[in-house]
């Protein structure tokens, strides 16, 4: 049984890479962007098995290849082919070069004890380079070693008898030989059942491994996103804290500005008071209209204006104080909220990493299960091969015994055929003598006809017996078939 599988994007997988002697063929899917997806078409065909078979596509190390259900094509009759759809999904795939192994195989072949259907698997390695154009800092297609380099494709496997004895010949065996044969066949069937169970256990373990790897890839992507969010939140918190500190400093600087403005207000007020005192003294001494009075008044006016400027400056400082207080309050609240957000993001990143670690352990355990299941299948196949050898040995011994029995039956039938033919010839001779003696015509018509019919009946029996023997020879080994046919031909020749 040889399955054929095809790849979407208009390409047939089997035609895209030839199987080499060095290892498994590889198909390069090229560069794909994170988040991109393509349809993958997998096609199986029953090339040489006469009965309907099931095919499965098995995935290894390809969490980016997903399907809605098991990748199984069931009930393919002789020459039939059918396709199923899968998807290349790179939403959770990190940038870089990735390799995976895709195996298509017949899952119902290989354990046909009484048929000629072989298990046959076809392997191919898929390579893809994933790029993230939105993140220039991410590695874009770094060099990665192919983990499947040098590995050999999976070998075909079959459990089948070389030449099982037919039911007619089994009936000829004595009880002891028949029991030995049945015991050997039962052992083989038990080995077959154990092997099929081990094979199913392996398939289940491989599916669990694939599901686990896909979940691990998703968790890693979420953890990476959470880590990036935590770094952004941490920087935002740092920026918010800086803004809050600057606002607090600005608020603190107000005290200095306020003291400076108040001092200026006080000093200008004192200057105004001194100028007014001097104006009063000059006015009292010189009277209104004197030059000294005018100059004193100008000084008062100038100092008064300076005082008003100082008051206005102090008022502005006072008003800015409210704005600084509001800014300081807001930036402090923002910084606190940013710090909480940063801690939440950091906790989320840690929780995501913890999930990844737990999933890695789970996948590790499943990987061990796959290894154990593969070992169990190998052991089952070894046991099945041993059972086949023992069953073939028992079949050969039984065939020899059945042939001896058949030879004796042939000799007995030969003798019976010779006796019946002699009796028929004597009967015909008697009636021929009656004819010669001139018996009545009616008597000749009646009895002579019966004699000829009797001869024909005997000849038919001889031919039937010969054909039975010829048919029975099908259950004997090929090495003795020619001798048996010779004996049958001798028997058949006697009836001519």
Image (spheres, helix red, strand yellow):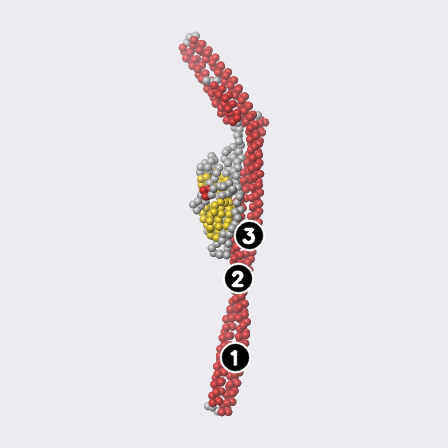
Residue 67 seen in the current view: no
Dot placed on the residue nearer the N-terminal end, 1 or 2? 2
Looking at marks 2 and 3 on the same chain, the residue that comes earlier in the sequence is marked by: 2
Residue at image mark 1: 265
Identify the disc placed on residue 235.
Answer: 2
Which residue sits at x=51%, y=25%? 481
Secondary structure beneath dot 1 equals helix
- Foreground mark, 2 or 3, reads 2
Q: Position of residue 78 (x, y in %)?
A: 45, 36
**Residue 31 in the image, given as x and y percentages of width and height:** 47, 50
Q: Name the residue nearer the viewer: 45 or 468.
A: 45
Q: Is residue 272 visible?
A: yes
Dot 1, crowdedness within 10 Å: few (<14), some or many (≥20)? many
Outermost residue, left direction? Answer: 441
Circle 3 is placed at which residue position?
356
Residue 284 position (above or below residue 73): below
């Amino acid at each position: 049984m040889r399955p054929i599988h095809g790849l979407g994007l208009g390409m047939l997988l089997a035609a895209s890479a030839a199987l080499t002697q060095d290892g498994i063929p590889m198909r390069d899917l090229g560069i794909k962007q994170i988040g991109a997806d393509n349809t993958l078409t997998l096609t199986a065909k029953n090339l040489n098995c006469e009965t309907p078979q099931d095919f499965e596509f098995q995935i290894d190390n390809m969490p980016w290849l997903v399907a809605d259900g098991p990748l199984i094509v069931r009930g393919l009759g002789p020459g039939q082919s059918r396709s199923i759809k899968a998807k290349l999904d790179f939403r959770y795939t990190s940038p870089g070069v990735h390799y995976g192994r895709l195996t298509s195989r017949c899952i119902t072949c290989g354990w046909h004890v009484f048929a000629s259907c072989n298990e046959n698997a076809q392997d191919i390695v898929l390579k893809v380079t994933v790029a993230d154009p939105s993140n220039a800092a991410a590695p874009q297609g770094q060099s990665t070693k192919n983990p499947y380099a040098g590995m050999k494709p999976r070998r075909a496997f079959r459990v089948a008898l070389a030449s099982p004895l037919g039911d007619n010949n089994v009936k000829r065996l004595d009880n002891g030989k028949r029991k030995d044969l049945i015991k050997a066949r039962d052992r083989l069937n038990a080995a077959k059942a154990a092997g099929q169970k081990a094979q199913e256990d392996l398939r289940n373990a491989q599916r669990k491994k694939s599901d686990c790897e896909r979940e691990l890839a998703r968790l890693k992507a979420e953890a990476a996103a959470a880590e990036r969010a935590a770094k952004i939140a941490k920087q935002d918190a740092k920026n918010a804290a800086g803004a809050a500190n600057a606002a607090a400093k600005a608020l603190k600087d107000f005290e200095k500005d306020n003291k400076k403005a108040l001092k200026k207000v006080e000093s200008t007020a004192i200057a105004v008071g001194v100028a007014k005192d001097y104006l009063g003294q000059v006015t009292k001494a010189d009277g209104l209209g004197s030059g000294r009075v005018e100059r004193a008044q100008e000084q008062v006016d100038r100092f008064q204006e300076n005082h008003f400027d100082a008051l206005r400056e102090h008022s502005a400082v006072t008003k800015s104080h409210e704005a600084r207080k509001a800014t300081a309050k807001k930036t402090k609240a923002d910084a606190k909220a940013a710090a909480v957000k940063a801690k939440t993001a950091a906790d989320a990143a840690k929780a995501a990493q913890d999930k990844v670690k737990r999933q890695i352990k789970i996948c590790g355990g499943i990987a061990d299960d796959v290894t154990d299941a593969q070992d169990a299948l190998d052991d089952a196949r070894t046991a099945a091969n041993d059972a086949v050898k023992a069953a073939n040995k028992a079949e050969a011994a039984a065939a020899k015994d059945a042939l001896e029995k058949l030879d004796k039956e042939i000799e007995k039938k030969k003798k019976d055929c010779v006796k019946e033919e002699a009796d028929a010839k004597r009967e015909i001779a008697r009636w021929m003598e009656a004819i010669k003696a001139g018996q009545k015509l009616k008597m000749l018509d009646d009895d002579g006809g019966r004699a000829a019919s009797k001869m024909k009946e005997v000849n038919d029996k001889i031919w039937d017996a010969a054909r039975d023997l010829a048919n029975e020879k099908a259950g004997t080994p090929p090495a003795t078939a020619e001798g048996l046919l010779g004996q049958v031909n001798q028997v058949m020749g006697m009836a001519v």
